[in-house]
Image (cartoon, rainbow, N blue to C red):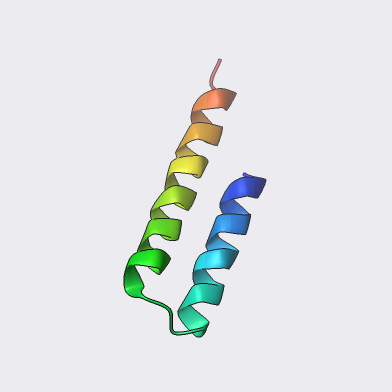
Amino acid sequence: MGLAGLLIGGAVSFHHQKLPKFLVISFGVLAAMALVAAYLLTLP
């Protein structure tokens, strides 16, 4: 979950720096995948 937070922070930072959209979107997708992985690891 911490990794997802760092990735979202990077995406927001890249958005504010006016970097290409594919970087922002890719960091967002990676953050979503990290959240899904963290959820799946907590299942019994």
Toward the viewer: 41 or 28? Answer: 28
Residue drawn at (50%, 42%) of the image: 34
Residue drawn at (51%, 43%) of the image: 35
Q: Is residue 29 above or below residue 24?
A: above
Q: Position of residue 2 (x, y in %)?
A: 66, 48
Extreme-left residue of the structure: 22
Q: Is residue 14 above or below residue 34?
A: below
Toward the viewer: 13 or 37? Answer: 13
Quadrant of image for the C terminus: top right
Extreme-top residue of the structure: 44
Toward the viewer: 19 or 38? Answer: 19
Extreme-right residue of the structure: 2
Q: Is residue 4 above or below residue 14?
A: above
The count of marks equals: 0
Q: Position of residue 21 (x, y in %)?
A: 34, 73
Q: Position of residue 16 (x, y in %)?
A: 51, 83
Residue drawn at (50%, 74%) of the image: 14
Residue drawn at (62%, 57%) of the image: 6
Q: Position of residue 20 (x, y in %)?
A: 36, 75
Toward the viewer: 44 or 36? Answer: 36
Quadrant of image for the N terminus: top right
14 relative to 26 in the view: left or right = right
**Residue 5 occupies which quadrant of the picture?**
bottom right
